Amino acid sequence: MPDNVGMDYKDYYAVLGVPRTASQADVKKAFRKLARQHHPDAKPGDTAAERKFKEVNEANEVLSDPAKRKQYDELGANWETMRRARESGAGGAGGPFAGFGGAGGGGNVRYEFRTGGDGDFSDFFRVFFGDETPGTAGVSGARTASARTRAPAPPAPPATHEATAEITLPEAFHGTTRLVEVEGKRLEITIPPGADTGTRLKLSKRGPGGGDLIVVVRLLPDPTFTRRGADLERELPLTLEEALLGAEVKVETLKGRVLLTIPKGTQPGRTFRLSGQGMPRFKASGHGDLYVKARVVIPTALPDDATAAARTFFDLTRQPDPR
């Protein structure tokens, strides 16, 4: 913007198309109608409509505010006095806006402005109703309107941090605690029963700086059990005798030891379902199941007499070819 620019009086009543006696409701109604008519979204790329929309918005900013409207109405009456003084060459001396004369003297009333401010409002608005104030060169006695207050930007929310907690399968079964460290801050967290790899635990406002802490669980492999959601799987080694003749076999579960009845003639790979012996359901009631898969262990390095006995046994069973 040039250092010195002429500034015209803004007739906000004319912009909204309402009389000076219009009520606040009339001002609001006129603004809404014109804002819809000239909104940039309704006329994309129409610079004239965009300019008109800004004028309408500026007029409403003043006339919808009783304090600004009163100030503006007082300004309007004095502006005519200043105009007549300008035409007569008196410079407006003695008036309520006296001192707004040009730096070079004479009857031309001119103003200086600092650049910046809200680009959506005119120089006229920024001088009398906004944050901008007239420059000092050649300008004295200027009356500055109360500035529009701008709320400070809200502070950024504290950052959310993540940490990983590794747990064993028995710890996942019973629940456990872990110490995690984030940016030098150590926290003890509780991991509920049933947690699995990928389970996310949120600790509100317990992270560094008051932010949230997200703890991601990672389940370590177990040498005995394989987890499938809330269900567990494991192998159960059986002797040849147990598989052929049947038996009651002790089975270790994460709940404790149970007895499993093995029927006679159990084939390798046969699976037994132990209801309710699986994992607790995370943040829910009940447990999954445990699936036990038979694995028959064949004896090796038989002595001669055992080999002979085995041949006699197989001669007696006369097992058909399974292939």
Image (cartoon, grey):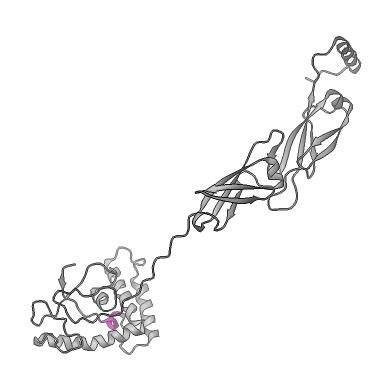
What residue lies at 80% left-to-right and 20% top-to-bottom?
298
Q: Residue at x 48, y 55 (%)?
A: 159
Along the horizontal axis of the image, is 135 left or right of 157?
left
Image coordinates of residue 309 in percent, x first then y, are 89, 13
Q: Considering only vertical position in the picture, is 253 above or below 162?
A: above
**Which image quarter holds the C terminus?**
top right
Q: Nearer the viewer, residue 91 or 310?
A: 91
- On the rendered structure, is 284 left or right of 88? right
Dividing the picture into quadrants, the one containing residue 95 is bottom left
| Relative image position of residue 2 (x, y in whole percent) | 16, 68
Please tell me which residue is depicted at 28% across the width and 84% down the height of the picture. 72
Quarter of the rendering containing residue 302 = top right
State the residue in front, 175 or 50.
Answer: 175
Q: Where 15 falls versus 243 (above or below)?
A: below
Q: Quadrant of residue 154?
A: bottom left
Query: Which image quarter holds the N terminus?
Result: bottom left
| Outermost right residue | 316
Visible in this render: residue 113? yes
Tell me which secondary structure the magenta stretch mostly adopts.
helix
Task: Indicate the position of residue 30 as horizontal and vertical percent values.
Answer: 36, 80
Q: In this rendering, would 295 be left or right of 112?
A: right
Asked if the magenta segment contains residue 152, the reply would be no
Position of 230 relative to 142 (above/below)? above
- 176 horizontally vs 183: left or right: right
Q: Residue at x 69, y 39 (%)?
A: 227
Q: Residue furthest top?
A: 304
Q: Which residues are magenta?
A: 11-15
* Residue 263 seen by the camera: no
Pick the front one: 264 or 13: 264
Q: As rendered, which of 289 and 11 lies closer to the eye? A: 289
